[in-house]
Image (spheres, rainbow, N blue to C red):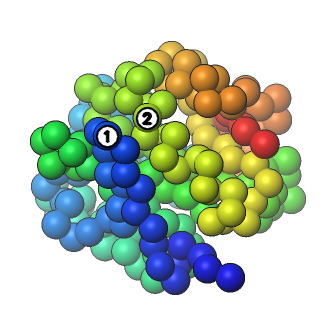
């Protein structure tokens, strides 16, 4: 059985390419993770206090190094989102199969981090349309979940168009913290 940890697939649409994160992405991704308008939409739930607001090349390099290690260790896959017109990285997508004792067990947990000028329903829809359909098989899960805070109106619009709905249940973190604002698709 093929997994994304054996061979990481790339996904491509007219405007975007999703491929495994690379060390050469650091400069472009610093523009994403230092974008103060974008940070409130990032999902740091259960990430040991990391808010993903990185303002130095060193800190961004550390994150990319960790994401690369996480892939080698089969913890999660982090794809870089490349705008094909500019050939620049404009965000990342993380996905893994979450095993837990809450509602979100055997769940493909998806984290989408985008530069604020890409936080538009049509961009989000196109990007997620690439990864959501194959995610069930890739990560052997029954549902996909992603966080969309109330102020993420464009993100929520795209998620609903893709068939996601607001979860009534909270995601329970390793330390018992309850996290809300998740959208799920079975």
Are the residues at dot 2 and dot 1 in contact (C-beta closer than 8 Å)? yes
For marks 2 and 1 on the same chain, the one whose residue lies earlier in the sequence: 1
Q: Nearer the viewer, residue 4 or 51?
A: 4
Q: Which residue is mark 2?
A: 126
**How far apart in space, not on screen, are marks 2 and 1 (Cα)?**
9 Å
Within the image, what quadrant is residue 79 found in? bottom left
Q: Quadrant where the N terminus lies?
A: bottom right
Number of numbered discs present? 2
Q: Which residue is mark 1?
A: 14
At label 2, counting other C-alpha atoms closer than 10 Å, the crowd grade (few under 14, some 14-19, many 20 or more) is: some
Q: Secondary structure at mark 1?
A: loop
Q: From the viewer's perspective, is 132 left or right of 164? A: left
Can you say whether 157 is above or below 108 in the image? above
- 2 or 1: mark nearer the eye: 1
Q: Residue at x 38, y 29 (%)?
A: 123
Q: Residue at x 32, y 51 (%)?
A: 17
Q: Quadrant where the C terminus lies?
A: top right
């Amino acid at each position: 059985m093929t997994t994304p940890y054996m061979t990481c697939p790339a996904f491509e649409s007219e405007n975007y390419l999703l491929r495994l994160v690379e060390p050469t992405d650091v400069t472009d991704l610093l523009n994403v993770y230092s974008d103060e308008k974008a940070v409130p939409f990032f999902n740091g739930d259960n990430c040991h206090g990391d808010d993903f607001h990185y303002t130095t090349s060193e800190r961004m390099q550390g994150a990319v190094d960790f994401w690369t290690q996480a892939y080698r260790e089969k913890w999660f896959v982090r794809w870089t989102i490349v705008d094909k017109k500019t050939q620049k990285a404009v965000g990342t997508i993380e996905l893994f199969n979450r095993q837990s004792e809450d509602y979100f067990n055997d769940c493909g947990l998806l984290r989408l981090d985008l530069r604020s000028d890409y936080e538009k329903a049509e961009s989000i829809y196109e990007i997620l349309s690439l990864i959501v359909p194959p995610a069930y098989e890739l990560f052997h899960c029954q549902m996909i979940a992603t966080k969309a805070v109330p102020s993420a109106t464009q993100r929520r619009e795209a998620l609903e168009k893709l068939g996601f709905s607001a979860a009534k249940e909270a995601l329970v973190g390793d330390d018992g913290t309850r996290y809300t604002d998740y959208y799920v698709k079975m």
